[in-house]
Each structure stands twice: as C-alpha cells, then as structure tokens.
C-alpha cells in the first residue's frame, strides 16, 4: 500500500531560521513525490515535484530512496512561508495522489 | 492565470438529501479529480476521470457517489443521499497530464 507520513502536525520556527518539514513514504515501485502548499484561505498549490529538481520560493526537496524520505527544506524561513504543507505521492496508475496529513508551519517574526 | 473554480463555496444540506457539487476545470485539461478533507484530517482521493469515464476510484467512492461531465466545461460530484459523515471540504482538481494537479478552492459541505 502507498502511504505518506508527515510526523509533525505543527512546526514553529523563527524568521530567518532554517526549516525542514519531514515526509516519509512507503511505495513498492518508483515514486513520484510532490509538495503542495495551502496558504490561509487559499487553494492547494503545487510547490515542488521531485522530478523537476527545482527550487521554488527558496524551498528544495531531495528524494532519498534509501531513507524513503522527501523532506522539504528552506535555509531562511520568511513570515510569508506560514502555511499548511502537504507531501503527496502519485499512485501506481499515475492518476491519483496520496496525501500526508499535513504540517502547519508558523514562522514567528 | 486559468484556475479551477468550484461552486458553491459552502453548502448546507439535510441528511438524506442529494447534493451536487460543481467544478469548472481548466479548459485544456484532460484529467479530473475529486478529493475530500474531513476537518482535521488529511486530503483523501475520491475519484479520477478521464476520457468521459472513471479511471480510478477509492473505497470511499461508493454507490452514493457519482461523477459526471454533463457538458464540455463542468465536472460534477453528486452525493445521492447524504450522511453526517459526508461533511467535509470537497476539492476538485484537473490536470493536463497526471503529474501535476491544479486544485479548486473547495466546497465546504455541511450535512445536518
């Protein structure tokens, strides 16, 4: 079964501090992994996908197949980063996403 | 920038009533999805739709649920006889290909 685990429901960091949101997964094949973000009162938006290996808004995420992790990192958190972050994995047929329970990030000024 | 739109933003209905949640996907997208999020819980997949038929559905998507693309633009989710536990935020999403889904703002369904 495909499963995505985000161990932290809540995470608070000070502005300018590094932030890491953890995501672990279990999957029997080659996964496609994503980070979605939901700012207050806004829709879910794609933040990152592992195949593109790009940095968006200063965030990066590396797929570690050995540790089955896809942690989201940013070296210097900003107040506008406060949001709900969801790690997601695409299903075996490619037409559904499995979401983690989400981590609520608060950046303290 | 084109976006997925959902109506209504909030729907209150009595238990046992039928509800239809509406979505207008992004115009050139071919894949359509419904997800739901019960308050305090994770986003859960309900169904995906491609080429005018369901391509995949979860165990949540039982006979009470149905989806339709009645015309070239709308994508609807119908719940035939709502239960209290159907209260949730329902998200529609669409994608040009399966690797990136664009989500709507959601419809909050409250069953009383």
Image (cartoon, coloured by chain):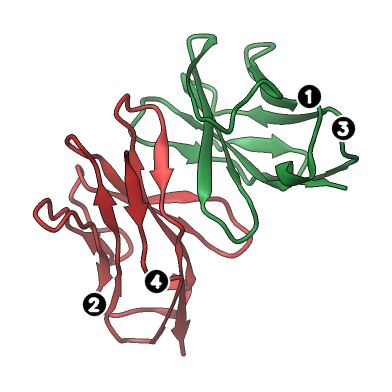
> Which chain is in green here?
B
Location of residue A1 (image quadrant): top left
Indicate which disc, 3 or 1, sits on the residue closer to the N terminus: 3
Say what secondary structure mark 1 lies in.
loop
Q: Position of residue A11 (x, y in %)?
A: 42, 78
Between circles 1 and 2, the one closer to the viewer is 1
**Residue A58, placed above or below residue A47:** below
Mark 3–mark 1 Cα distance, whole angstroms, equals: 8 Å
Residue bearing mark 3: B16
Q: Colour of chain A?
A: red
Between circles 2 and 3, the one closer to the viewer is 3
Mark 1–mark 2 Cα distance, whole angstroms, equals: 49 Å
Which chain letter matches label 1?
B
Labels 3 and 4 share a subunit:
no
Q: Position of residue A16 (x, y in %)?
A: 32, 86
Mark 3–mark 4 Cα distance, whole angstroms, equals: 37 Å
Q: Is residue B77 visible?
A: yes
| Residue in view at x 27 percent, y 72 percent | A74
Mark 2–mark 3 Cα distance, whole angstroms, equals: 51 Å
Q: Is residue B1 visible?
A: no
How packed mark 1 is, by other alpha carbons closer than 10 Å (few <14, some 14-19, many 20 or more), is some
Say what secondary structure mark 3 lies in.
loop
Residue B80 image label: 1
Most extreme residue toward the right is B14
Residue bearing mark 4: A8
| Residue in view at x 69 percent, y 12 percent | B70
Labels 4 and 2 share a subunit:
yes
Relative placement, left or right, of B36 versus B31 is right
Residue A75 image label: 2
Say what secondary structure mark 2 lies in.
loop
| Residue in view at x 65 percent, y 57 percent | B39
Between circles 4 and 2, the one closer to the viewer is 4
């Amino acid at each position: 079964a495909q499963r995505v685990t985000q161990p932290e429901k809540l995470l608070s960091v000070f502005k300018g501090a590094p932030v890491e949101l953890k995501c672990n997964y279990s999957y029997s094949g080659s996964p496609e992994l994503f980070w979605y973000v939901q700012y207050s009162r806004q829709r879910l938006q794609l933040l990152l996908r592992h195949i593109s290996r790009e940095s968006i808004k200063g965030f990066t995420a590396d797929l570690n197949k050995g540790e089955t992790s896809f942690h989201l990192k940013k070296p210097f958190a900003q107040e506008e980063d406060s949001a709900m972050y969801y790690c997601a994995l695409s299903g075996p047929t490619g037409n559904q996403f499995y979401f983690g329970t989400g981590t609520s990030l608060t950046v303290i000024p | 920038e084109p976006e997925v739109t959902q109506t209504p933003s909030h729907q209150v209905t009595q238990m046992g009533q039928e509800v239809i949640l509406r979505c207008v996907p992004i115009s050139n997208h071919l894949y359509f999805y419904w997800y739901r999020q019960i308050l305090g819980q994770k986003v859960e997949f309900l169904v995906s739709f491609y080429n005018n038929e369901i391509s995949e559905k979860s165990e949540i998507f039982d006979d009470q649920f149905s989806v339709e693309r009645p015309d070239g633009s709308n994508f609807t989710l119908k719940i035939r006889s709502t239960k209290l536990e159907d209260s949730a935020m329902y998200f529609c999403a669409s994608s040009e290909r399966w690797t990136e889904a664009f989500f709507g703002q959601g419809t909050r369904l409250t069953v009383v």
